[in-house]
Image (cartoon, rainbow, N blue to C red):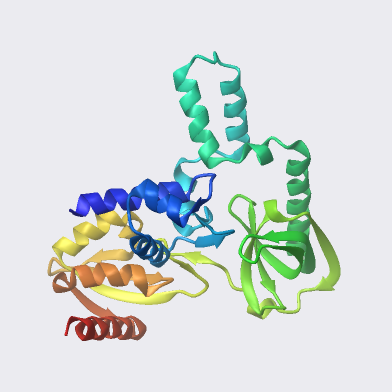
Amino acid sequence: MRHDKLERELNLLLLLTENHSYTVDELCGKVGISRRNLYYYLEFFRDCGFNVYKRAGSYCIDRSSPFFDHLVSRISFTEEEAVLMRRLLDKTDRGNVLAANLKKKLDHFYDFGILDDYELREQSIRCIRALYDAIKLRRQVVLVGYASPHSRTVRDRFVEPFRLMGNNNEVRCYEPSSGMNKTFKVSRMQGVEVLDSEWAYADRHRRMFTDVFMFSGEELLPVELVLGELSYNIMKEEYPQAKPFITDGADGRHLLRLDVCSYSGIGRFVLGLYDDISVLGGDGFKAYLDAKLKAFANRAR
């Protein structure tokens, strides 16, 4: 049944976001699925915008994924608040079950080994100050000893920082060696060396956007739809951030004009309610839907 599948998906999602890395066999055993289904779920999570990565034979979901950024901005505590709460809970009666449960929940979401480390926090503050100055002065920098979980390397990175993000926990930079804009975490830097050289690639700097469907990207793609009453109500309920982009038509239908970072999110919505939606634009989205429908028709033969 669908609710059984959803329960497995949610359980797997929770396991992948814990402060623990699980192997393929461990994940299969805990969720009760085959290896084939596990890889299917992991690919599904990637399609939904989660940053799934493999490290030392184990799988995790990066908490910098757009979905979590959106969720955390509404319900999470700042690092300072989390540390204070953890210390207050440590002072409570050890037999207090509620306090023990709260500490367990906090430990799932915050690495107190880092947050309680005064020297490490001071290091992050120095990095942020240096990055702020570099952005203000339009200077190039070296991220000293940056630890990358993807390449599993620790090395210096020569970049042009141009935007602090995520409550100053991340910085958006252009990296000349790769020719790409990347997001770097301040906690993974050993230091920041501000250089005398000014930006040389300002025209290549690209912001990272997140659309209402929780997909992120450097470019915004226009989409224009006419929604019937069913699709209009579902859009409002499931994607409330889309409301400002909807205008009511005289015929009782609703016009949706918005930009997206990927056609995947809006595409699933349209294909699921195709008989209640008219696609007016853009041309790229029409081509995307056409390719999806053709691919589906070929598989259904």
Q: Position of residue 280 (x, y in %)?
A: 26, 80
Q: Position of residue 260 (x, y in %)?
A: 40, 70
Q: Residue at x 61, y 39 (%)?
A: 79
Q: Quadrant of residue 146?
A: bottom right
Q: Quadrant of residue 121?
A: top right
Q: Residue at x 36, y 74 (%)?
A: 263
On-image quarter of the C terminus: bottom left
Q: In the image shown, does 194 or 256 lie closer to the viewer?
A: 194
Q: Position of residue 68 (x, y in %)?
A: 47, 52
Q: Position of residue 145 (x, y in %)?
A: 78, 59
Compared across the picture, whether 62 is left or right of 124 comes to left
Q: In the image shown, does 24 or 51 lie closer to the viewer?
A: 24
| Count of numbered labels shown in the rendering | 0
Compared across the picture, whether 150 is left or right of 218 comes to right
Q: In the image shown, does 284 or 101 lie closer to the viewer?
A: 101
Compared across the picture, whether 280 is left or right of 165 comes to left
Q: Is residue 17 above or below residue 290?
A: above
Q: Residue at x 60, y 21 (%)?
A: 90
Q: Residue at x 53, y 46 (%)?
A: 20
Compared across the picture, whether 196 is left or right of 83 comes to right
Q: Is residue 271 above or below residue 164?
A: below
